[in-house]
Amino acid sequence: MKVSIQNFFNSKRHKQICYYIFIIALLGATFDPVNARERVNRSQLELEELSVLSSATGWMLSPAGEWESKKNRIPWHLDEKLSILKKVPEYALGTDNFKNYKFYQAKEANKIFIVFVKTYKDGRYLYENISEGWIDGTYTQAYAFELGELKKLQNLVDEKLNKIEINAFDYEYITISSKSKAIDVIKKNIGYQAPNKFTNTLVFEIYPEKSKNLTQFNIYNKSSNGVRNNPYINGTFTFGSNELFKRCYYEVSYDKFSLFIEDALKALK
């Protein structure tokens, strides 16, 4: 069937062709490959270790009213009749544990901030339904916060519970990995201040007793506790409550903990 030129120009098909030509022309005018925005890689984040704490004694008040302790871990809160569970891998790692706590100074271009890192042991069952195939390893939590937040750790009051909340603008959680791999992940990922990024509050609870050369402390994430297990005691979760120091804490010499904090504070100078 013949279609006249006039009918073609008035047809729907002609209008569609004209529309596509217009879109193609518009794209050609607005996209200039020479002036297209460049993709710029993030500059390498430099981490300088400021201080480290790698040993302390963890204490937990048992349901029977007896204090139990373990090196670098707070024992599980268990009734005496359930004490056999302490040998089970899930419980053997304690309510909380740590391999070390570290403060780093992070540098990126003209930006300087602080990274606090907790390294600890945790694990899971490969077959959770039947609690078999336990796999454990090293886990890492890293918190990025502004340099000025360190000032909150100055002037700790002796023989008083100092509860300090550090506002972290970024957080990184790294599952089973080696130390070197964890540091690589931190360098690559931490420190972005995205508008919608979830922030975290890092809590330091510190009770120094200079006369006894002892400091008791707890460090945890206010948002997600940041510990392996948050025991439910007397109707409340322990971590984050006023009951915490009556039930569990870490203990280390006053001098060692003071050095840990003082070396970190040198970043302010």
Image (cartoon, rainbow, N blue to C red):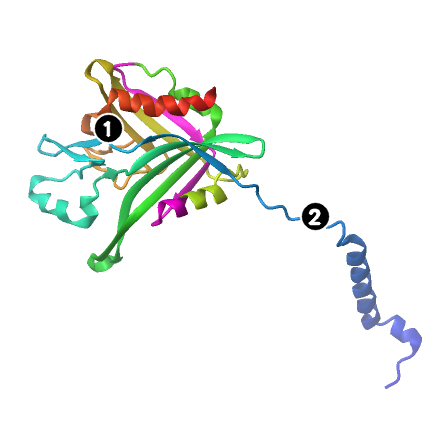
Rendered residue at 9%/30% (across/down): 66
When the figure is inspected, residue 184 is found, relative to residue 103, above or below; the finding is below
Q: Position of residue 225 (x, y in %)?
A: 32, 36
6 sits to left or right of 226: right
Q: Quadrant of residue 218?
A: top left
Q: Are marks 1 and 2 in contact (CB under 8 Å)?
A: no
| Magenta stretch: includes residue 7 | no
Between discs 1 and 2, the one toward the N terminus: 2
Residue to which mark 2 is pinned: 37
| Magenta stretch: includes residue 178 | yes
Q: Position of residue 159 (x, y in %)?
A: 25, 15
Which is in the foreground here, disc 1 or disc 2? Answer: 2
205 sits to left or right of 264: left
Quadrant of the rendering where the N terminus is positioned: bottom right
Q: Position of residue 9 (x, y in %)?
A: 89, 71
Residue to which mark 1 is pinned: 244
Q: Amino acid at mark 2?
A: Arg
Magenta span of residues: 158-182
